[in-house]
Image: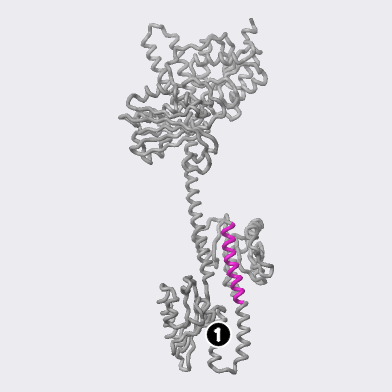
Amino acid sequence: MAPTSADQANILLVDDQPAKLLTYEAMLGDLGENLIKVGSGREALRCLLTTDVALVLIDVCMPDIDGFELAKLIREHPRFRKTPLIFVSALQVSELDSLRGYEAGAVDYVPVPVEPKVLRAKVRVFVELHRKTRELESLNVELERRVEERTAALQATAQRLQESERSRSLAMAAGEMGSWEWDLMTGEYRWDRGQYRIFGVDPDSFHPAPENVAPLIHPDDLDRVRADGDRAARTGEAYHAEFRIIRSDGEVRWCVAGGAATRDDSGTPVRLSGVIHDITGRKRAEENLQHRNDVLEHLVEERTREREAALAQLFEAQKVETIGHLTGGVAHDFNNLLMAVLGSLELLKKRLPAEDERSRRLLDNAAQGAERGAALTQRLLAFARRQELRPEAVSLPELFQGMREFLERAMGPEVEIQVSVPEGLSAAKVDANQLELALLNLAVNARDAMPTGGALSIAAHELMHDDGQGSEPPALPPGEYVCITVTDTGSGMDEATLARATEPFFTTKGVGKGTGLGLSMIHGLASQSGGALLVSSQVGQGTAVQLWLPKSERAPDVHRSAVPEGSGMDQVGPATDHLVTLLVDDDALVRAGTAEMLEDLGHRAVEAETGSQALERLQALRGRLDLVITDHAMPGMSGSELIRRLRLAYPLLPVLLASGYADMAEEEQVEDWPRLSKPFRQSELAAAIARAVRRSKTPTANDTAA
């Protein structure tokens, strides 16, 4: 029930920012108290002099008089020495700031952002204390008025009645709770009904003798209460004690007792008279406030830990992202170099005499080295999440069935392979060839971890991922996924090794036995596919790798296995007519090597270094052009933008986008343009040209000329 206007306490809000005053008003409006808003320290002082204020909330930073100076001025006025002051600060509060605030007279310090529930709880406690204080003062005034009336009417009575009434007056003035008297000459106690009520005993049956009162005092407080009473009786000093009592029903309550000595003519104490006040409510309020403070401190510590953990994750993500950018750029440039090397080697081999076996072996060795470099480049691009992926609906049972024989050859007879994939498993949305390579990589890692043999288990199941499940990837959006789990019984990894397992170039294998890009490549594939990678391991028990992939909504597609089936140096692609081809690439080596391939295939190559230069070449050819082959990453105009312009001017002109770098906008990635991944062989170039020409409905320039 909200207090009426007459019962409302005045809460003074002091802040030079109107927006913050409105915020405090919104937080504290539900309390039903009268909120007084002022914008400066001077206004606050004027308000205090004219208004009875229960509590003052002060902003620390204000232009004319800051919060510390205002608190000092308030405390210097005797009327406001006990008025509660709470500082609210948006700055980082140091220990020195807190000490300065408390020295200035603050009772609490509330940092920003303010927790509304905590602020309301604190304000409610101080307002209730103010209200109770005012009620007690009012009651004390009323009691003093009544006592004075009774004293005036009974002045003619006996001295004993006057002394008794004086004792009662003293007790009632202290709080109208309970009064007591201890006759030091006889040792007798006299209680009023309030005293009996506090102790929970019947005035008609309970005799307040020392031996009867002692069991009602809490055992832990009894010796201290007796010592304080004996000292007051002996010296005549004022008596004050805070202690617990145990009522007859077993309830423990807190009390505070105070008394003063009455002396005879010789100055010897003959009587102690005083009052007792039940402060259980105040104690419980203090405990509740302390509990809330403890909870708040716990929340602050928890939030601090969460923030530190988030900052650590952010730093790690930024570090990996930086390495990824660097790796992707290096891999792109390396792709262009390998393109020139592989193309030149292939053309050179075709020009060697058939009987020159030694030169052919040397060329094959060079080509194999370049191919290994190309494979390493693909891993670098996978780690950088910039490889060109072709996601499709992949049937995992068919994929594992197709890989089974190759895996058995790769693992050897010492390793037992167990595959558990249900036939009705939903398709996964992923690049099938890259997934095969990732699984092969995991299998080889497992084999190397089991030098004396063991078991390799591959399982898959589909599941629904929800936020907040601790055993699942934390950064994965909710949805349906297919989870592939590869488990081995190898040597396992300790915590330090496991923490670095997916870092690029980190490997536990010997020199020349690993690049350190295997798991980082798989991690890049999972992330780029919209999934995640989880690795768990225990020393001596093995390692389990979970590859989460999004579930596909379409039926499985048919794909060609990525498992290598032999060299392609001597393979020749499908033949096409002699074409006039516009070749666009900013790298002179790549452009020259590709032009040689085209001319070796019987085509004519017209070279352009940039997209704008390509448009000029196209204009000069006056339409006698059969095909455009363009790189993607070029300065000024990208290959995607060039193709888009060509589509507007020449919608039926065949185009081929050649790039090994998937740094394209999302809308460019979904365009259904024929593509050729770098580095490529002459046979792959010929096949890609044939596909691009078949897709076009327009006749070639040669056909038109004929």
Residue with the most extreme top position: 706
Give percent across and percent down for residue 507. 38, 33
Residue 455: which quarter of the image? top left
Q: Is residue 53 visible?
A: yes
Relative to the observer, which residue lies in front, 98 or 143? 143
Residue 221: which quarter of the image? bottom left
Chief secondary structure of the magenta portion: helix
Q: Which residues are magenta?
A: 116-137
> Which SS class for mark 1?
helix
Give percent across and percent down for residue 263. 48, 90
Q: How is the image coloured?
A: one colour
Q: Is residue 17 visible?
A: no
Give percent across and percent down for residue 312. 47, 44
126 is within the stretch colored magenta: yes
Residue for point 56% across, 88% down:
165
User: Label 1 belongs to which residue?
Assistant: 168
Give percent across and percent down for residue 304. 49, 51
Lateral position of residue 567 relative to residue 39, left or right: left
- Quadrant location, the C terminus: top right
Q: Is residue 54 above or below residue 661?
A: below
586 is within the stretch colored magenta: no
Relative to the observer, which residue lies in front, 386 or 258? 258
Q: Is residue 329 above or below residue 138?
A: above
> Callout 1: 10 Å neighbours few (<14), some, many (20+)?
many
Residue with the most extreme right position: 5
Residue for point 61% across, 81% down:
143
